[in-house]
Amino acid sequence: MKERLLEGSDKIKGLRHMDNVKVFADYPDLTKRDLIFAIGIEGKDYNQLRKNYQDRGVTIYERVNTSVYSKRILEAIGLTGAIRVSPFHCHTVDDIDKFLSVTKELSVTRELTNY
């Protein structure tokens, strides 16, 4: 699942290869990674992104440094916010592909642009 999320498949690009998508704290050795990812989409508000994912049937959580629960970890890695992606053992390849498809859609739409 980690490799599919990051690298994608013949059907869809992975997070590492999508325009405007940044995988935070990324490194190549997947054996040393948990199945939790912090991502951002350039120019997008994290709270609004959560709502847009939710509207499309995908559950993710925003982490922002204004939250006492998220502030310490975000600031420790030099971020003000991130989208937390954490698939469970019950998620399927189709679920991952749906998430990637929604991420691709949101990364190219203007509806979430911050002003």
Image (cartoon, rainbow, N blue to C red):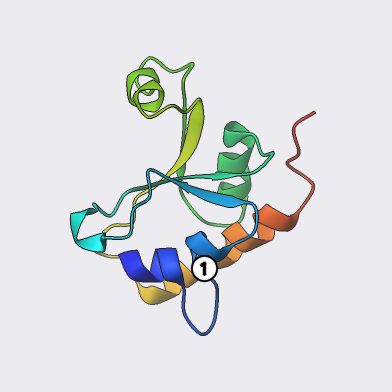
Secondary structure of residue under mark 1: helix
Image quadrant where residue 114 sits: top right
Q: Residue extending furthest left?
A: 31
Residue name at image x 67 percent, y 61 percent: 105
Q: Quadrant of the C terminus?
A: top right
Q: Residue extending furthest front?
A: 28
| Residue 55 drawn above or below residue 64 | below
Residue 67 image offset from top left, x and y in percent: 43, 18
Residue name at image x 48 percent, y 36 percent: 82
Residue name at image x 66 percent, y 39 percent: 44
Q: Residue extending furthest bottom?
A: 10
Tell me the kind of residue under disc 1: Lys
Q: In which quarter of the image is the N terminus?
A: bottom left
Task: Identify residue for label 1.
Answer: 98
Position of residue 81 in the picture relative to residue 71 (left or right)? right
Residue 103 image offset from top left, x and y in percent: 58, 58
Asked if residue 15 can be seen in this view, the reply is yes
Position of residue 34 in the picture relative to residue 108 (left or right)? left
| Residue 76 drawn above or below residue 37 | above
Residue 52 image offset from top left, x and y in percent: 63, 47
